[in-house]
Amino acid sequence: MTTPKQGRAKKTYESLLLAAQEILAESGLEKLNSNNIVARAGYSPPAFYRYFEDKFAVLHVLATRLMETQNRILEEIEQPLTLEEDVFLNEVTEIMRRTLGVTREFIAGKQLMILMRMHPDLQKIRINSHKAMTAVLMDAFQKQDMDLPEPLLNIRGRMIVEMGYACIEMLLESDFGEHENEVLRGSAVASLAILKQPA
């Protein structure tokens, strides 16, 4: 079913999604099922099946929303990325910091990141998101007149996207919080090194 756009239907739909996020954040995938979702949201089971086939349909919506939230940070950068070292490192570190921040604020963001590695259908959401962000980076790099063939530029852009995502995962899943700045800056330094390596 298509996403409801207005009125009571939209309220029900969003309430079910929020309930699913809270259950996932508190108890993990094992406790995420239609009965628990409707109980948390205050509805009956038919309300769930009006909008979702199963819990993985819910996870698909939530994972897509998380990726879109992360992607907007890069998409909305007003100034094109420059390869001037200090500026590049500061800009990329800030992009990473904001991405980490919105992921932490997204209820069950950490759990959804993990599931997008584990579950085949959710993996597609992550991979498609990373392809889209690679295209954004390629556009930014091409504006810098980098003398690299497009396939190589695409590989390097994808490496940067994957590395940044992995660093976000590491900070969410580990006890490196007090070294957060070092991790984010390190990702920026590595990104610049990838771009500047000889062809």
Image (cartoon, grey):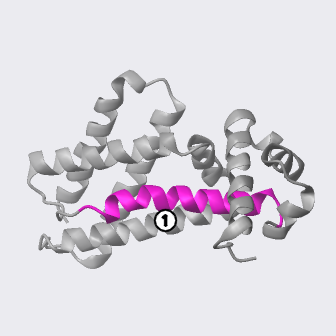
Is label 1 in a helix, a strand or a loop? Answer: helix
Above or below: residue 12 compared with residue 135: above
What residue sits right under mark 1 in the picture?
129
Q: The N terminus lies in which quarter of the figure?
A: bottom right
Measuring 52% from the left and 69% from the top, which residue is drawn there?
Answer: 128
> In this orientation, which residue lies closer to the viewer: 65 or 140?
65
Q: What is the quadrant of residue 196 in the picture? A: bottom left
Measuring 58% from the left and 64% from the top, which residue is drawn there?
Answer: 125
> In this orientation, which residue lies closer to the viewer: 5 or 137?
5
Q: Which residues lie in the magenta part?
A: 53-77
Above or below: residue 52 compared with residue 44: below
Measuring 33% from the left and 65% from the top, which residue is drawn there?
Answer: 75
Measuring 33% from the left and 34% from the top, which residue is drawn there?
Answer: 183
Where does the image place residue 173, in percent across and percent down from the top left? Answer: 54, 33
Q: Is residue 20 left or right of residue 192?
A: right
Q: What is the quadrant of residue 36 in the picture? A: top right
Q: Is residue 80 visible?
A: yes
Q: Is residue 181 left or right of residue 174?
A: left
Q: Is residue 159 visible?
A: no
